Image (cartoon, helix red, strand yellow):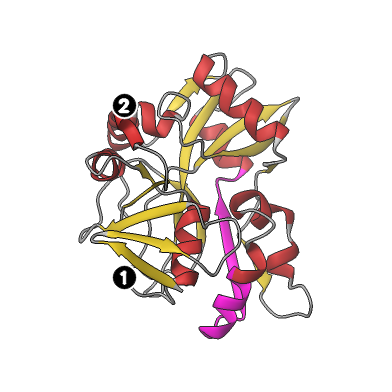
Amino acid sequence: MVKLVSRPEYSIDNLPGFENLRFTESSTVYPSLPASVKYATERDDILQSAREAWAFRISSSGTLNSDKYQSTRTAALGVKIDGTHYIAIDDSDDPAANILLARPQEGYDAHRKNGRWVLPKSEPIITGMLDRAQHAGRVFPALEQTLKLSTKGTPASAYGAHPITQALLGEDLTESVAAYLRDHGREYGRVWTLSPTQLDELGVDNDHVEVRRVGVGGFVNFSYDLDAVDRCNDGGRARGVARKNSIGNKS
């Protein structure tokens, strides 16, 4: 369960792999990306990833505003490789290495004005994100339509075993997510990405990528979807995360 460490910090003690993290309280509103990043950095932390948002939700049983729609630093880069469109996932907590943390206002302005944030694939920060995604096995073909996966099954569900949910959340967490969905009456979990046609229309080619981010859907209206289509001007509850022994952005 989630334990209150010191107001307003929390830790997780019942999910392996998350013991060394501390979490802030949630924002009380649904800020866009720049305000979400600011919310976390003002607390000397980093905006949560999609994986961390789900871990906190599971551990807290949906309390502490964790069952609301969540804003994350998890990037979903639409990229074209050898004529095929892919989605590359990266959520580095290094503010200099993650485009969403490094340039949130630029993304907000681009998405708000033009509905797209298309950047050269050759930009060093983008190259680094694509390399990490490739090496971590977090690159998959862009979906032609919504991915709908059953949460039922023993010992593994379709949701828990699917390579796309595992790329988004980690293979050690997806079955716990599926169990949470089952316990909350969801027979299926869904994943959204931009389609190849949409990526073409946005201007994604062999030399350019479209930057989106992963929103973590909540109980009300969103059916717990993983939305790898969020723009930087879209909102979600923000929460900061840091290593317990870290001094956060002060370094």
What mark, if any, has residue 243 been given in the picture?
none
Q: Amino acid at mark 1?
A: Leu
**Residue plotted at (65% across, 57% down):** 165
- Element marked by disc 1: loop
User: Are discs 2 and 1 less than 8 Å apart at CB?
Assistant: no
Nearest the eye: 175 or 103: 175
Q: Provide the residue designation for mark 2.
A: 106
In this rendering, the label closer to the viewer, 2 or 1: 1
Asked if residue 142 is positioned above or below residue 51 in the image, the reply reads: above
Q: Amino acid at mark 2?
A: Glu
Residue 200: x and y, percent? Answer: 58, 33
| Residue 186 falls within the magenta-colored stretch | yes
- At 46% from the left and 26% from the top, the residue drawn is 118
249 vs 39, nearest the viewer: 249
- For residue 105: magenta? no
Looking at the image, is 175 positioned above or below residue 73?
below
Q: Secondary structure at mark 2?
A: helix
Q: Residue 7: x and y, percent? A: 23, 61
* Residue identified by numbered label 1: 64
Work out whether 26 lies above or below 155.
above
Q: Quadrant of residue 28?
A: bottom left
Magenta region, residue range: 177-195
Q: Position of residue 217 (x, y in %)?
A: 44, 64
41, 140: nearer the viewer: 41
